[in-house]
Image (cartoon, grey):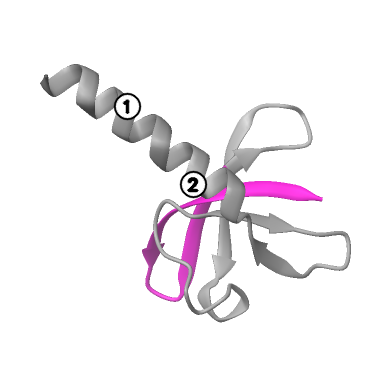
Amino acid sequence: MRKLVVERFDGKYAICEGEGKDGEVRKFAIPAEEVPSDVKAGVCIIINDDGEIIIDEAETQLRREEVRAKENKLFK
């Protein structure tokens, strides 16, 4: 299982960031037609052992809340 965050879409690819097998942060290009159609930048995804790509709703929400908290602290 691999957890990734969709950074952006570039042409026919979803450019994602996640931990590589060596533990380092890496970028991955996944064909856009392989990710769920409602995925957009900032969404966390999981590639399970069967190669199925699903949205990690809980992790996505947690990351959004963390960003909002940082923005509130910065701009207040």
Total marks placed: 2
Which residue lies at the image location 11% right of the left edge and 19% below the top edge? 76
Q: Which residue is mark 2?
A: 61
Give the percent coordinates (x, y) of residue 25: 59, 32
Which residue lies at the image location 58% right of the left edge and 44% below the top edge? 59
Q: Does residue 26 sit above or below 43 in this rendering?
A: above
Amino acid type at image mark 1:
Ala
Q: Which residue is mark 1?
A: 69
Give the percent coordinates (x, y) of residue 15: 48, 57
- Which image quadrant is residue 66 in? top left
- By secondary structure, the bulk of the magenta-drawn segment is best described as strand
Residue 62 inside the magenta-drawn segment: no
Amino acid type at image mark 2:
Gln
Foreground of the two, 14 or 52: 52
Q: Give the magenta part as a residue range.
A: 1-17
Give the percent coordinates (x, y) of residue 44: 55, 51
Callout 2: helix, strand or loop? helix
In the rendered structure, are the residues bearing label 1 and label 2 in contact, judged by CB atoms less than 8 Å apart?
no
Q: Does residue 57 sit above or below 37 in this rendering?
A: above
Foreground of the two, 41 or 74: 74
* Label 1: few (<14), some (14–19) or many (≥20) C-alpha neighbours in 10 Å: few
- How far apart are the two marked residues, 1 and 2, measured between alpha carbons? 12 Å
| Image position of 15 (left or right of 22) | left
Q: Does residue 23 sit above or below 60 in this rendering?
A: above
- Which image quadrant is residue 56 in? bottom right
Foreground of the two, 76 or 51: 76
Pointer 1 or 2: first along the chain: 2
Callout 1: helix, strand or loop? helix
Which residue lies at the image location 39% right of the left edge and 64% below the top edge? 9
Q: Does residue 57 sit above or below 24 in this rendering?
A: below
Which residue lies at the image location 56% right of the left edge and 81% below the top edge? 33
